[in-house]
Image (spheres, rainbow, N blue to C red):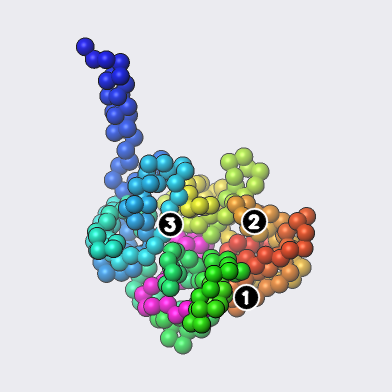
Amino acid sequence: MRTLLSVLTLCFATTTAHAAPAEGELPGIDFPAGDTTARAGEWILSVNKLMYDKFAAAPSREGVIFYAYVVAEPGAKTTKFMSFGKEETVPNLLVIPLPKGGKAKAGDILLTWWQSGSGMTRAIVMSAKDPTKPVVRYIDIDYDNPAKGGKDRKTPIGQMEEQLRPDSFVKLDKPWQVGTTVACKTADGASWSIENVVRVAGDKALLTGFMGLLTARAKADCTPMPQRAAFKKGQKVMAKWVTSVKPATVTKVDAKIGRVWVTFDGMGKGELALAVGHVIDKL
């Protein structure tokens, strides 16, 4: 006769097995599996196995960070890439292609990675004498980040310029494009948060937010954020504040570097330099 413990163990194991996601899907997230446009030998932004396993064990608590990899073998639902000499496989939902042949011009907003550091980021093109290898600033790094970089190793990394390698970026110029930002209503509808688009399928979007947490949201609950600094000094706006969006006033705009300085209403006179995509006229 089975003991109560063995029965409970069997039930738990069965439940766990049934809860496992289908190929190409993500645990704990209601979003359909999909194909990829990535091709062998191309750069992608994705999530390594160690990070994916942590996320899969606790999808509501563990976030992800997208790093740069080279595709080994794309598939209909999953893709293989090389990471530190090992082949890894992830669902296509976590594969962001950076197709070959990209060209840019000054002022363009690009999706790439911090190429002298690591991690997915948006960047603004400062110059493009060679449009296949533009010189950029990384706008998703805080403007006043105290860490130093650049050729002189003395420039704050949020203000440094760096030349991208060929075939390592994609231009962001459409609402809901992967890599752009959106403002989404919180569950209680009382406030908003800024999220990054990872995937879109029909009327749903797969997003990353604070600490890289993945969520599936209805597109109707979100508003695309402008990827341009089309604001004026003194203008009333809604701007990113840590994990939320708050009323603010524009104090300075530097469209060339993709930054908007604001003060938050009722929070003193301290200015904060925000990236384009983190400020909108109204919600």
Name which quarter of the figure residue 101 lies in: bottom left
Q: State yes or no: residue 147 in magenta.
A: no
Circle 1 sits on which residue?
Answer: 255
Circle 3 sits on which residue?
Answer: 65
From the viewer's perspective, tell me whether residue 86 is left or right of residue 133: left
State the residue at coordinates (53%, 52%): 210
Residues in magenta?
A: 161-180
The residue under label 3 is which amino acid type? Ile
State the residue at coordinates (43%, 53%): 64
Q: Do the numbered discs 3 and 2 sit on residues whose CB atoms are within 8 Å?
A: no
> Residue 13: percent from the left, percent from the top?
29, 29
Q: Please say if 1 is above or below 230.
A: above
The residue under label 2 is which amino acid type? Trp
**Which of the two labelled residues, at mark 2 and mark 1, occupies the earlier sequence position?**
2
Residue 39 in view: no
Circle 2 sits on which residue?
Answer: 241
Name which quarter of the figure residue 276 lies in: bottom right
Image disc number at residue 10: none
| Residue nearest the observer in this picture, 35 or 134 | 134
